[in-house]
Image: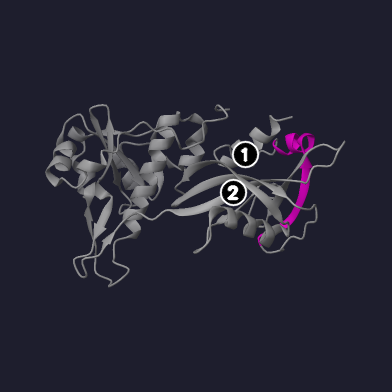
Amino acid sequence: MRPLGSLPYTGGTLDRVAARRTDVCWVENQLASPGTVIIPLWRDQCLIREESQVQVASADAEALLTHAPDPVFLGLSGETAVFAADLSALDGDDAVSLAGADAVGDVRMLFSALSTEEAALLAYARGILRWNREQQFCGACGTQTQSGAGGHQRACPGCDKLHFPRIEPAVIVLVEAPPVPGQPDRCLLARHRKSAAGSFATLAGFVETGESLEEAVRREVDEEAGVKVGAVTYQGSQPWPFPSGIMIGFRAQALSEEITVDNDELVEARWFTRADLSEELADPHRKPDSIESYLIQSWLRED
């Protein structure tokens, strides 16, 4: 397990050089540099060779860039420029062959074998390439957009509107039961309708227009589990480009033990002691790359 304070998909050291992105000549020169590294992806999937993500030197990337004409500048690793290229226009076999890969695989499937830096870089590449792919047309007038700022904005020639990557904030929360003298501490976990059978998890949901993060926590817990909460305390955040989110983690204090699940998002919810939760964490369906693991592990270690 990674250190408790190291949240998945954070900790990247790439210098994004945001001030230079709008300098078209500078970006083009970086792309043309023989030492530049290009990371190809295909429809949000990593291209894998010998269980590692493929990276292609710019000097060897002519054929690849023919099929990915607008690579996105991710930043500098020391003096080395790093770009991401989207091969989604190809079918899977052609993308694998062109990249010199063996297969494709999801970032989350590879996570346990990735370093902190590799995980952060691939999540970043995945998210920004998907945004570019989905923002091909202006939402205001329907005109086809053009890539700019090294792939970090898209401009509409029809109405002059600039489009920037949108992040969808979501809250995730570990709710503690009201303390009872002489009784063990407990936290709230729920079984979600769309989750793996039998798997319990913390509660989460997207932030709505016109509410604060703390208000979103209280609303989600009340709507889904019927539990009223009082104090809400920030714990940390992590990028979640699956496809375009950021997860903001909280600890919250319930005002009562009463639970009334909505039978829509949730099918069951109950209070877990630390002993109960240690058994639940043995569930093989549970993925280790969510901030949920941090919230739960930090609570367990307070025993």
Circle 2: residue type = Ile
Res. 42 in view: yes
Q: Nearer the viewer, residue 13 or 85?
A: 13
Q: Nearer the viewer, residue 181 or 48?
A: 181
Q: Residue at x 56, y 40 (%)?
A: 291
**Which is more N-terminal, label 1 or label 2?**
2
Query: Residue at label 1?
Result: 295
Query: Residue at label 2?
Result: 172
Q: Residue at x 35, y 44 (%)?
A: 41
**Dot 2, how many residues are within 10 Å of its Cα: few (below 14), some (14-19), or many (20+)?**
many
Mark 2–mark 1 contact, CB under 8 Å? yes
Q: Residue at x 58, y 29 (%)?
A: 4
Q: Which mark is residue 195?
A: none
Circle 1: residue type = Leu
Span colored in magenta:
265-281
Q: Secondary structure at mark 2?
A: strand
Q: Residue at x 86, y 38 (%)?
A: 181
**Which residue appears farthest toward the left when viewing the image?**
25
Q: For the N terminus, which image quadrant?
A: top right
Q: For the C terminus, which image quadrant?
A: top right
The answer to if 271 sits in the magenta stretch is yes
**As displayed, is residue 106 above or below residue 220?**
above
**Dot 1, how many residues are within 10 Å of its Cα: few (below 14), some (14-19), or many (20+)?**
many
34 sits left or right of 152 in the view:
left
**Which residue appears farthest toward the front when viewing the image?**
231
21 sits left or right of 112 in the view:
left
